[in-house]
Image: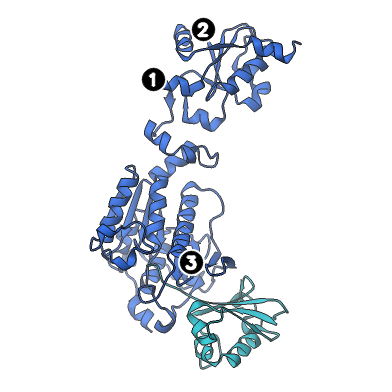
Chain colours: A blue, B cyan
Amino acid sequence: MAPETQAKQQVEEIEPFEAAQEIEGGDVVLIDTREPHEFQEARLEGGKLVPPGLLGDEIAAAAPDKSARTILYCRSGNRSYKAAEQMQVLGYEDVASMAGGILAWQEQGLPVVAAEGMTPEQRDRYSRHTLLPEVGVEGQLKMLNAKVLLLGAGGLGAPTALYLAAAGIGTMGLVDDDVVDASNLQRQVIHNTERVGVPKTESARLTIEALNPDVKVIEHRLRLDASNILEIIEDYDVIVDGADNFPTRYLLNDASVRLRKPVVSASILSFDGQISTFVPYEGPCYRCLYPTPPPAELAPSCSANGVLGAMAGTMGLLQANEVLKLVLGIGEPLIGRLLLFDALSTRFTELKVRRDPECPICGENAPEVPESEMGQFPDYELFCAG
Amino acid sequence: MATVRIPPVLRAQTGGQAEVEAAGSTVGEVLRALTAEHPDTQSQLFGADGDLNRYVNVYLNDEDVRVLDGLETGVSDGDTVVILPAMAGGR
């Protein structure tokens, strides 16, 4: 066997335009020596994938003829050079490595076979996602096809919406009937000083569109109530509950259980936040956790009380994180777990939440809701005042 | 002694304390030690019938006492009792 240093000197390097000419001429075996997720994203037409770690096992199948002309490429030319050395040691007689890899190839305007459904701009924009094996191009496409509804474009909704938009959630619905107030700006980072007085859904849409043109924003400038909730939520895959009142939280819970929509639910007050993910019938629902709302004196809202902006942001981003995992189908969402965040002590506490067999909405004995009564809900305002 | 974690909405009734040490061999005894020390918490935690209010969740460490033995759930030294009312703030 030839010493390694000798082998290294022997690897032929060719420029992308030379490789292109040879490939066009035919009779070339083209080997891609990158990882599967890179190959998925963009490759040279006719390239066969042989990841560096699997070369010993897979090269014989990809390149059965050791005397055939074989061109190797990778991202920038390093891995293909090393693979060429290995192949020469294995007895391949006519191997070349493409200098500069697929990056140089693309810089010269030569064509690649790109992953379906993503434009070159999207491949660039989302590259830090697609580089994650757990996400990949497939995962990014799931995000681009996902429809997420946010209840509230406020303390929680603002940071959640920003990160979901940046992530490329393709359709985002925003429910809010309020306008931007100067006192919102301490935490509602999707709005800005110039937008005081502008409807929150519109202000949020403008920010999102400037951040990521891939996102389609649907403004629902209204308050959710029993008459409109089913119609609004049925088009979405995941719902994010950042509502500021109990009637809406219970209404959303009952409607989302009926339609089997997952809900990522957080709430904030002063320095404290809590978050959980409710997936109907897979885990508990909001009513399993909180069977009845507290009386008004125990249920202050942020509008009348202080709230630390960075704490609201932390909870909003935990919501975004949950949404992305649900959309991608990865990791362990907070199903059956309630996570408390105490910003003052910087302490997280996790509590177990069980399905309540007696739950009037998702319990074993919960009444079936006939189709004709799907859109009928009790009067939650009364329920919460009582 | 157990440590009782006080939610923000009840801290006005505990002189601003977020954690209170309380003695007792059951969750009920610990909570009654808390209400004896801070009487204003009584009506927030317990109904007239002496039962926990339905809108207050109580956890022993990370488990809801409703799935344990309720107020009769045994408490050991060093346990944490978490009082947790629902919160609705999102704005």
Nearest the eye: A194 or A99: A194
Q: Nearer the viewer, mark 2 or mark 1?
A: 1
Which badge, 2 or 3, is on the more N-terminal residue? 2
Residue A178 vertical placement versus B69 (above, below): above
CB under 8 Å between callouts 3 and 1? no
The amino acid beneath tag 2 is Asp
- Alpha carbon of mark 2 to alpha carbon of mark 3: how far? 62 Å
Q: Is residue B77 visible?
A: yes
Name the residue tied to disc 2: A27
Image location of residue A380, percent across then percent down: 35, 76
- Alpha carbon of mark 2 to alpha carbon of mark 1: how far? 23 Å
Residue A109's tag is: 1
The amino acid beneath tag 1 is Gly
Q: Say whether residue B24 is left or right of residue A242.
A: right
Image location of residue A89, percent across then percent down: 70, 13
Callout 2: chain: A
Callout 1: chain: A
**Quarter of the figure with the N terminus of chain B:** bottom right
Residue A285's tag is: 3
The amino acid beneath tag 3 is Cys
Callout 3: chain: A
Q: What secondary structure is found at the residue carrying circle 2? A: loop
Which badge, 2 or 1, is on the more N-terminal residue? 2
* Residues indicated by labels 2 and 1 sit on the same polypeptide chain: yes
**Which residue is at 59% across, 67% downward?**
A349
Q: What secondary structure is found at the residue carrying circle 1? A: loop
**Which residue is at 46% across, 21% downward?**
A104
Corner quadrant of residue A238: bottom left
Q: Is residue A280 visible?
A: no
